[in-house]
Amino acid sequence: MHEASAITVFLTDRHPEAGLAPAVDDPLRGTFLQWLVYLSNTLQMAYQLTYYPWRFCETPDHYESARARSCIRLREIWGFIDQAVGDREWMLGERFSAADIHLHMLTTWLSPDRGHPTMDEFPNASRIAAKTAERATVKKVFGL
């Protein structure tokens, strides 16, 4: 398994007692899966343009263009996420999930030194990420 969303689903389904994902028959399951795929396949891809431009460009003289496009794309994607979650407590509404942990993790990849936006631009996503970071288990994993 290589995709972050697939690994997350595998682990949350393997350990349902952790309560980090809706069960297969839960109406929120589809929303959970959509968020995981969006975070891993859309948002993470935008980060790749910054951190691994050689994967997208044939020659080094195009690396800076890829990095600049990454910053634009990150702002677009974080803006979409921010608008989509709105004033909900968590990405799934009232329910904390592994999608919130994934969101928090992706905020740690932002680098103002690389021209990335800051989470201050996205108050709804920032609120969820901050609340996630305060959880004891997340603090333990991230060494906070």
Image (tube, grey):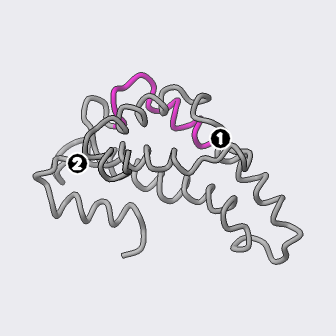
Q: Is residue 87 left or right of residue 63?
A: left
Q: Is residue 42 above or below residue 19?
A: below
**Disc 2 target residue:** 20
User: Where is residue 103 drawn, in percent x and y?
Assistant: 44, 45
User: Where is residue 6 drawn, in percent x and y?
Assistant: 35, 65
Q: Residue at x 57, y 34 (%)?
A: 119
Q: Is residue 87 left or right of residue 138?
A: right
Give the position of the N terminus as an image quadrant.
bottom left
- Specify whether residue 99 is painted magenta: no
Q: Is label 2 in a helix, a strand or a loop?
A: loop
User: Where is residue 62 drawn, in percent x and y?
Assistant: 85, 67
Question: Between residues 62 and 114, which one lies in front from this camera angle?
Answer: 114
Q: Is residue 120 left or right of residue 99?
A: right
**Which disc number belongs to residue 43?**
none
**Disc 1 target residue:** 76
User: Where is residue 10 drawn, in percent x and y?
Assistant: 25, 65
Q: Amino acid at mark 1?
A: Glu
Q: Residue at x 37, y 50 (%)?
A: 143
Confirm or deny contact between disc 1 and disc 2 (CB under 8 A): no
Q: Is label 1 in a helix, a strand or a loop?
A: helix
Of badges 1 and 2, nearer the viewer stands 2
Disc 1 residue crowd, few under 14, some 14–19, many 20+, Cα 10 Å: some
Report the number of numbered marks: 2
User: What secondary structure predominates along the stretch shown in magenta?
Assistant: helix
Residue 120 occupies quadrant: top right
Q: Amino acid at mark 2?
A: Leu
Disc 2 residue crowd, few under 14, some 14–19, many 20+, Cα 10 Å: many
Question: What stretch of residues is rendered in magenta?
Answer: 76-91
Q: Residue furthest top?
A: 87
Q: Residue at x 26, y 29 (%)?
A: 94
